[in-house]
Amino acid sequence: METKALTTKEIIALLANKFPLCFSVEGQAKPLKVGIFQEIAEQLTEDDNVSKTRLRQVLRHYTSSWRYLKSIKVGASRINLTGESVAEIDQEQAEHAKNTLKESQEKFGHKDQKGKSKKDSSSNVDAKTKAKKAQKFQNVKSTKSAKVAAKPAKEVKLEQANPAAVKVGANVKVKFGNSPMNAVVTEVDGSDVHVQLASGMVVKTQVEQIFN
């Protein structure tokens, strides 16, 4: 009888149970040691339920989560499987995590209210400046386009994927707003689908947002 493959949540729970000082399933996450994949793989050599491929996908999912990215701050300690501090996060790593978090939140329409209040005054000035530039550009563009008819933009036609074909490893397109993005399915849990974008980021969406 074929054993049912573990979901991403189940594998993270397994890691949290086996390495409780390193992984967690909820609450604040801890920054992981760079190269920790190999150590985990060696510890799980006897576990047939978690292949190296699935382990890589799960670690990518775990380290792309918002709660994990929020833990990557300058001076914070990276830990090994036993919870020991092995290195400190530098400015470059912290900045990369901050930008990745911001990009992920913006894709899902998330607004950081705390950050918003601090930026209100400067963003208003920026908005006015951009509006003036946009209007100036539009006036020039309108003058030029008066003589040349604009070609209609080609609409990208997407065919919704058959739910039965949405499986781990499948290459698909995911629709965020009006823009389809290439992605690879990393987990299917009912109508919830986790996909990895070309940028390496893992996000959760619904099966009805998956297209061919």
Image (cartoon, rainbow, N blue to C red):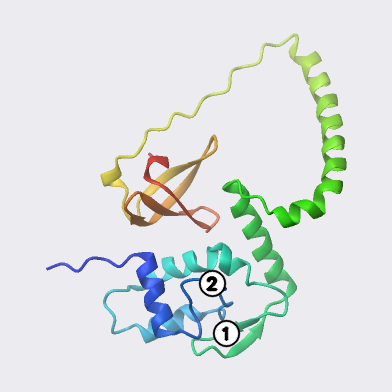
Q: How far from the left and from the top, in percent, is residue 85?
A: 61, 89
Q: Is residue 9 above or below residue 82?
A: above
Q: Give the labeled residue for mark 1.
A: 79
Q: Is residue 52 above or below residue 146?
A: below
Observer able to see residue 189: yes
Q: Amino acid at mark 1?
A: Ile
Secondary structure state at the residue bearing disc 2: loop
- Mark toward the viewer: 1 or 2: 2
| Whole-percent x, y for residue 8 in the image | 38, 65
Secondary structure of residue under mark 1: strand
Res. 95 image quadrant: bottom right
Q: Quadrant of residue 97?
A: bottom right
Q: Residues within 10 Å of mark 1 (few under 14, many from 20)?
A: many
Whether 28 is drawn above or below 42: the answer is above
Q: Earlier in the sequence, mark 1 or mark 2?
A: 2
What's the residue at 35%, 49% (across, down)?
191
Indicate the position of residue 179 as horizontal and vertical percent values. Answer: 54, 37
> What is the x, y in percent for residue 181?
50, 43
Residue at the extreme left: 1
Taking 72 as reference, is 136 left or right? right
**Residue tagged 2:** 27
Q: Is residue 210 visible?
A: no
User: Residue at left 16%, top 67%?
Assistant: 2
Do the residues under discs 1 and 2 have CB atoms within 8 angstroms?
Answer: no
Q: Amino acid at mark 2?
A: Gly
Q: Quadrant of the N terminus?
A: bottom left
Q: Residue at x 39, y 85 (%)?
A: 42
**Marks 1/2: CA–CA distance:** 17 Å
Looking at this view, is 190 or 99 the one in front? 190
Position of residue 49 in the picture relative to residue 79 (left or right):
left
Q: Nearer the viewer, residue 167 or 12?
A: 12
Residue 116 numbered mark, or none: none
